[in-house]
Amino acid sequence: MPKLIIDSKEVSFEQGQTVLEAARENGIKIPHFCWHPKLSISGNCRICLVEIEKLPKLVISCSTLAAEGMIVHTRSEKVINARNAVMEFILINHPLDCPICDEAGECKLQDYAYKHGTGESRFVEEKNHKDKRVELGPHVMFDAERCISCSRCIRFCDEIAKEAQLTFIKRGDRVTIVTYPGQQLDNPYSMNVVDICPVGALTSRDFRFKARVWEMSSTASVCQGCSRGCNIDIWVRNNEILRLTPRKNEEVNSYWMCDHGRLNTFKFVNENRVGMPYIKSGGELIQSTWDAAVNKAASLLKTVNKDKTAFIGSASASCEDNYILMKFARSVIGTKNISYYKYIDENFGDDILRRSDVTPNSTGADLLGMNGYLNYSNLSDGINNGSIKAVYLMDDNIVDKDPSLEALFSKLDFLIVHSSNMTKTAGMADVLFPSAAFAEINGTLVNFNKRVQRLRPAVALKEADRSLDGMNVSRLDKFGTGYDRWAQGRKRDALSGWKIISMIAAQLNNKFKYDTAEDVFNEIVRSIPEFAGLDYELIGKNGSDLKVKIAQPTLKA
Amino acid sequence: MDIWITIGFTLIKMLVIIVIMFLSVAYLVYFERKISAWVQDRLGPNRVGWKGALQPFADVFKLVLKEDIVPDAANKPIHTIAPVIALFIAFSTYAVIPFGPSLEIFGYTVSLVVADVNIGILYVLALTSIGVYAITLAGWSSGSKYSLLGGIRSSAQMISYEVSMGFSVAGVLLLSESLRPIAIVETQGAWLWNAWIQPIGFITFLVSAFAETNRLPFDLPEAEPELVGGFHTEYSSLKFAAFFLAEYANMLIASALIVTLYFGGYNIPFIDINSIGLAPWLAVAAQVAAFVGKVVFMLFFFLWVRWTIPRFRYDQLMNLGWKVMFPLSLLNLLWVAALIMIFKM
Amino acid sequence: MSVKKRAKDLTLLERIYIPEIIKGLALTLKTMFRPKYTMEYPEEKFVPPPSYRGRPVLVLDENNEERCVACGLCSRVCPSLAIDIQASETEREKERYPERFEINMLRCIFCGLCEEVCPEEAIVMSKDYEMAFSNRENAIFGKDKLLVPVSQLKDRIEFLRSYK
């Protein structure tokens, strides 16, 4: 391997790497605004200037190819002076907006100004004024004054989202970014430009001014939007999810996620929740207690012939929940009527990240052996011809997807539902259990590519204690008391599916002995060969591939 | 018939004394707070009544309204009886202290002392010794370590200082050759007071009096920083009030006793009242006023010292008692004996 | 061998102690007659100097608009986490304003860091020291209680400018 010397440290690199990449791989930090590992090199910000011996001038490390025997200085006086000068130049027209800027706290420019700036400005003239509130698209707001013209967003649209929508216009200090005439920044990945923008020029219209970044806790999790299972961080303040951001994972989603996943997959955790167990009485759901609901469910399950009871799992639920449902159906009730619904939306999939299978865990459900799936007509036929008299439904709002089931469900002897939200399906239940949402539990999902990934609790349930249960805490969580309004965020009285089912099993004299989701997963590992050798630690933050590979188109990014 | 009149006069004297004592004790508390404030550049209580003059009544009212709490671990009968003893001792001691000479009322000679007992001084010493029981029992019966320590300290302190107190008084008794308080007062006359004749005895008596009344700098039994409240930690409401009143009543008695023994009692300084030729009732009134004036000064002195001198450490207290006060009081005895030998033989 | 005299060694006169007591008594007696400095509070009120840090308040500027832009720096710097802010968007030029601004006066320690960190001179320490609450809810001051016209805060703002 060829070698070069950076800051008197010998470093090896691969042919074709730039100096910046070689330094980065070896833990030497060279500041950069316009360079992004997944975007083409633009070289316009000039902050990555380094000194290379035998070259007459400083060069930008992001576009200089590393060569054998090169001697690079990143901290020499010349480089530091140049950096100070570049910072000063960039800051000339950058407004002092930090107090009202959403980027503050995670802003590259802010960080570099501390690290590489001189601390004061010699520029006494009036700063440039440009448009401050431009709606570039449905989800993105643009503040032209803050823009440092790094062109990351333009390159992202061209290269990653593959829809050229943004461009520079004008020159010099009047340069600004606009959408092409008649266009909007409305590609399905548009919000990634908010993440990659090194300043606060591009902000999320959804998250705008909701919270300062330092007030939230972030928890590594997995997106629920489709079977890609993009890695995400869940940002929580006062026990409420405020935003999702993509988390880098080269095996799954690289640095990106789609707007649908970012915007539409977390709001249900905050709103319209099933707050407690319910029992239907006189056609209406009446608030109840866990004991009563579990008793009721257990006694209902005894009333119907086991072969006439259908258990329906969910491609949105974790492997743990589906496994326990299956175990319950087979060993406690003794029926083979177990299945789940798969949701395919051909319009949704694309060849970037999105998959047509819009549930996060259908592969997991298949691997667990939740029998070849029923389709709608099968369940309908079953209910119609009387071969199915009772349904136990976990975490799937099927009535919304197939309204014809509404009439059929009223023919059933009983319907037991786990649901996190007050949906149409939940409203039809005879016994309704509040189930925990993906952001509230430990669990595993298997993506289309057979990669097992972890869910972690970001929002605390009533049974949980943020710090005692090892959940991520923000400063406010850590030091707040029950008397502080900002620490009184509602904790829902919901439980993971496997816990609810274990309670019912106990009522039917079958002890399921699990303390944690990890216990359940360990049993899955023991009993399902595909999962062999895995454990929560091994899965870690980035997930772990199952041994059985199916050929799938890989990520193009 | 005479006996009934004597009893009647005695009852009246008792009534007058008790009322006066209650009032003066109440106002003693008020002045304690005022003087502490003045010493510390403050104003002191000034909310209730003119310049806070009704403060004592507000204090009493508050104490009466408080809940009476008795700890579970307390020995309840003794816990209840201890403050009663304290108060009883404090008030009954005053019986033998004369506050004026004899007075002719409707042809009857009335001496201005409740009980003119010929062993009066012995009576005082005896009763103050019983006073230790109140504090010790209170400390022991409360079932609390702080109370117990306070009680034990108190008994040790009182016993120690009673020795030097006793020897100091012995000097006075030698001179007047009587245990009758009136006789002691009469012996001293207009200016030949014991305080000048036996200064060492006076100082040892004064210091012992401070120790006996548990006043600063000798208030070890209730040393707040160490013992919370000392023997009365577990007392509240009226029982606490009883201890509180007893402390100030004791102070009043100590002052009266010092005046009687060392400052010529009701004698007016340097004036032979009977030779001026005032009306007899006026002369008596002047003498009572002289007595009251002296007592008031002594009380002020008590308060003044409290807000000037810090508390002794316990070992210092014991050292002072046994190694300084006791030898000094013996020395005083020798001194008085020598005086008697020189002048009377 | 001579024993060195130490500062704490007392002379004989000092060890007799009585002269020292008399000195002490003389001092306290003198003090008793000195003028008193007590301020009789409810009748007579203390008017603090501009350097006084009383209750933190939000400034309403000359146009009767709040200066605060809800940047959250005061909330972040507050060592006792007394400040709770929810920002929101406004059509005015400054874009951002506090939809909710609450100071929990039971948590506030009057350190003045919020005032020091504020980039807009929007939160300052007033001269108000009279704060008594009968329950916890009343101790949480919202915008209704916090906003104070700038004219009442001139002293403090001038003081701050002279030190910045």
Image: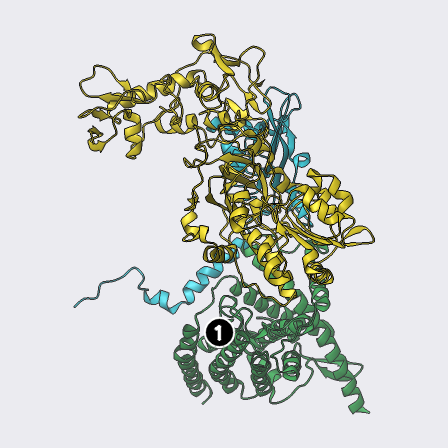
The relative height of residue A198 versus residue B338 in the rendered view (above or below) is above
What amino acid does circle 1 point to? Answer: Val
Judging depth in this view, the residue of C6 and C52 nearest the camera is: C52
Q: In this view, does B21 lie to the left or right of B304?
A: right
Q: Is residue A443 left or right of residue C8?
A: right
Residue holding disc 1: B207
Q: Mark 1 lies on which chain?
A: B
Q: Which chain is yellow?
A: A
Q: Which residue lies furthest to the front in this view?
A: A385
Q: Is residue C121 left or right of residue B111?
A: left
Question: Where does the image place residue B12, in percent across and percent down from the top left?
Answer: 77, 80
Judging depth in this view, the residue of B87 and C145 nearest the camera is: C145
The relative height of residue A208 versus residue B322 in the rendered view (above or below) is above
Q: Residue at x 76, y 46 (%)?
A: A408
Question: Where does the image place residue C79, in percent across and percent down from the top left?
Answer: 50, 43
Q: In this view, does B31 lie to the left or right of B149?
A: right
Badge 1 element:
helix
Q: Chain B is drawn in which colour?
A: green
Q: Which chain is cyan?
A: C
